[in-house]
Image: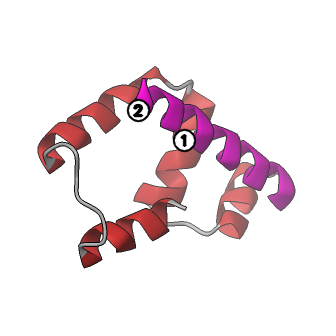
Amino acid sequence: MIEVQITEYESGAIEPKQSDGDLTDKLQIQLGRLDEDTRELIMLRFYSQLSFKEIAQKRSEPIGTTLAKTHRALKKLRQFMEG
């Protein structure tokens, strides 16, 4: 979902509501509010660009668990960003 939004933003389909610097600062603050496990999932997926399979192997957990935890992590981060 985030990847789709990034593509839409880059193509000019959506306009940013805040400057990129402000949004980046807000994202960093909100990431800091997440618990360590949740933050790690987001960092591995979107900053390190690991696949869900790679993350699951790294964390020694089933891929379904990784997918579910990542979904919940993004939902929580989205709530923080909107709040």
Q: Is residue 5 above or below residue 60?
A: below
Q: Is residue 74 above or below residue 46?
A: above
Circle 1: residue type? Glu
Q: Quadrant of the image for the C terminus?
A: top left
Q: Which percent across, then down, holds residue 25?
A: 22, 35
- Tags 1 and 2 in contact by the CB under 8 Å rule? no
Question: Which residue, given by chain and number where applicable, does mark 1 sit on?
Answer: 40
Question: Which residue, given by chain and number where applicable, does mark 2 sit on?
Answer: 81
Q: Is residue 27 above or below residue 14?
A: above
Residue placed most toward the observer, 8 or 31 = 8
- Classified by dominant secondary structure, the portion drawn in magenta counts as helix
Q: Nearer the viewer, mark 1 or mark 2?
A: 2
The mark nearer the N terminus, 1 or 2, is 1
Q: Which percent across, then down, holds residue 67?
A: 75, 55
What residue sits 61% from the left and 69% below the top? 51
What residue sits 16% from the left and 49% below the top? 20
SS state under label 2: helix
Circle 2: residue type? Met
Neighbour class for label 1 at 10 Å: few (<14), some, many (≥20)?
A: some
